Image (cartoon, rainbow, N blue to C red):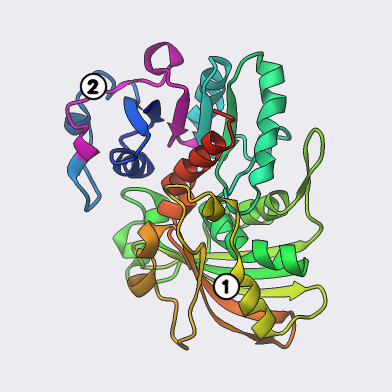
């Protein structure tokens, strides 16, 4: 068993980490951390459990510690911190020798930090070697992408690999759980659509080229493609739905695109990693799928769902895409990234 620490364990993403790690076959929760006002309390005392799983993952009696490597060091650290505290806390753990898997946006676009989706760009993990030379130890930071960008990148990866992506237009319909708890005020979201999510469109447009880019000796060469994102909050609890139009090299048919997605078997699936879904992309052929209510919890929320693949008169191909924002797009994605790093001998 490998000891792990969860930073920011009381929030929604922190609870997802605890939920997943409490039954993990080889990661064992050694430390949970929280803000100064909660440090020293028992986890159950400081945390209203918001999930439908076993409360506190069996860690309710564990005392929360400050988010400081002197108090809560483990060789693997999962960060559910907000971006502002992450800027100071995450590098401290990396400099102490931990490999930190972050959900914050603080270091996503740093030149030597992998913006990792285990299936999409596993070779980008080699950027850890550059960080380790700077730190002088075995530590480093690996970032998750924005949850909306993660879902989109999962669908684009096999298309970019087989055909080449030239341009993407994506319109999102994002679940309220993506805003954390308590999320969006009920009088704003019930029976309504909010056409603005702060910085979301910019994150998607910046992160997709980095994730689909090529690794050179010191950094990532971003993929050359145009990405346009239009992001909306909708009254759905879990699951980001995205309407995607994509321009591909060679103008493949809808049938060729369907085959590329259906046949995609990336490294985590070949390695049979614990958190990797059997099929990273589930293609639906019913005209009314995918739907958050019917599909998003399948495979523990770790697969993405694609349906209505059809010709687009402007871009060439269009489809509907769905993924779980707090499993695949947050805690589950980080845990899978750590499993991949472990399998590749980098932890």
Q: Quadrant of residue 16?
A: top left
**Residue situated in front as seen by the camera: 319 or 82:** 319
Are discs 2 and 1 less than 8 Å apart at CB? Answer: no
Q: Can residue 48 be seen from the camera position used here?
A: no
In the rendered image of this protein, does residue 104 appear above or below residue 226? above
For the N terminus, the quadrant is top left
Whether residue 231 sits left or right of residue 181 in the image: it is right
Q: Is residue 74 magenta?
A: yes
Residue 236 placement (x, y as % from top left):
36, 67
Compute the Cα span from label 2 to label 1: 45 Å
Name the mark on residue 262: 1
Q: Residues within 10 Å of mark 2 (few under 14, many from 20)?
A: some
Q: Secondary structure at mark 2?
A: loop
Q: Quadrant of residue 9?
A: top left
Q: Secondary structure at mark 1?
A: helix
Whether residue 196 sits left or right of residue 260 in the image: it is left
Whether residue 45 sits left or right of residue 240 in the image: it is left
Image mark count: 2
Mark 2, residue position: 63
In the rendered image of this protein, does residue 197 appear above or below residue 173? above
**Residue situated in front as seen by the camera: 163 or 307:** 163
In the rendered image of this protein, does residue 242 appear above or below residue 225? below
Camera-near label (2 vs 1) is 1
Q: Which residues are magenta?
A: 56-83
**Residue situated in front as seen by the camera: 227 or 74:** 74
For the C terminus, the quadrant is top right
x 33%, y 72%: residue: 293
Residue 177 placement (x, y as % from top left):
37, 55
Q: Can residue 281 be seen from the camera position used here?
A: yes
């Amino acid at each position: 068993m490998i000891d792990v620490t969860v930073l920011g364990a009381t929030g929604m993403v922190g609870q997802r980490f605890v939920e997943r790690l409490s039954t993990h076959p080889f990661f064992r929760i050694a430390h949970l951390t929280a803000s100064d006002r909660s440090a020293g309390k028992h986890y159950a005392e400081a945390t209203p459990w918001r999930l439908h799983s076993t409360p506190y993952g069996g860690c309710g009696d564990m005392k929360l510690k400050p988010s400081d490597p002197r108090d809560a060091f483990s060789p693997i650290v999962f960060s559910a911190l907000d971006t502002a505290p992450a800027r100071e806390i995450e590098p401290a753990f990396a400099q102490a020798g931990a490999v930190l898997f972050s959900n914050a946006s603080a270091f996503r676009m740093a030149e030597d930090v992998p913006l990792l989706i285990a299936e999409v760009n596993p070779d980008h993990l080699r950027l850890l070697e550059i960080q380790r030379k700077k730190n002088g130890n075995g530590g480093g930071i690996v970032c998750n992408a924005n949850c909306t960008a993660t879902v989109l990148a999962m669908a684009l990866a096999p298309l970019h690999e087989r055909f080449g992506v030239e341009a993407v237009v994506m319109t999102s319909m994002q679940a309220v759980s993506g805003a954390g708890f308590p999320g969006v005020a009920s009088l704003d979201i019930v029976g309504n659509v909010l056409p603005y999510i702060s910085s979301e469109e910019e994150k998607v447009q910046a992160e997709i080229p980095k994730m689909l880019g090529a690794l050179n000796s010191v950094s990532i060469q971003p993929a050359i493609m145009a990405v346009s994102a239009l992001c909306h909050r909708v009254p759905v609890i879990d699951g980001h739905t995205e309407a995607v139009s994509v321009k591909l090299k060679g103008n493949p048919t809808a049938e060729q695109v369907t085959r590329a997605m259906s046949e995609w078997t990336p490294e985590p699936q070949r390695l049979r990693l614990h958190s990797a879904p059997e099929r990273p992309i589930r293609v639906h052929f019913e005209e009314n799928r995918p739907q958050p209510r019917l599909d998003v919890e399948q495979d523990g929320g770790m697969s993405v769902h694609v349906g209505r693949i059809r010709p687009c008169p402007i871009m060439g191909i269009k489809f509907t895409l769905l993924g779980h924002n707090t499993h695949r797009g947050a805690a589950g994605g980080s845990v899978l990234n750590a499993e991949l790093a472990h399998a590749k001998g980098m932890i």
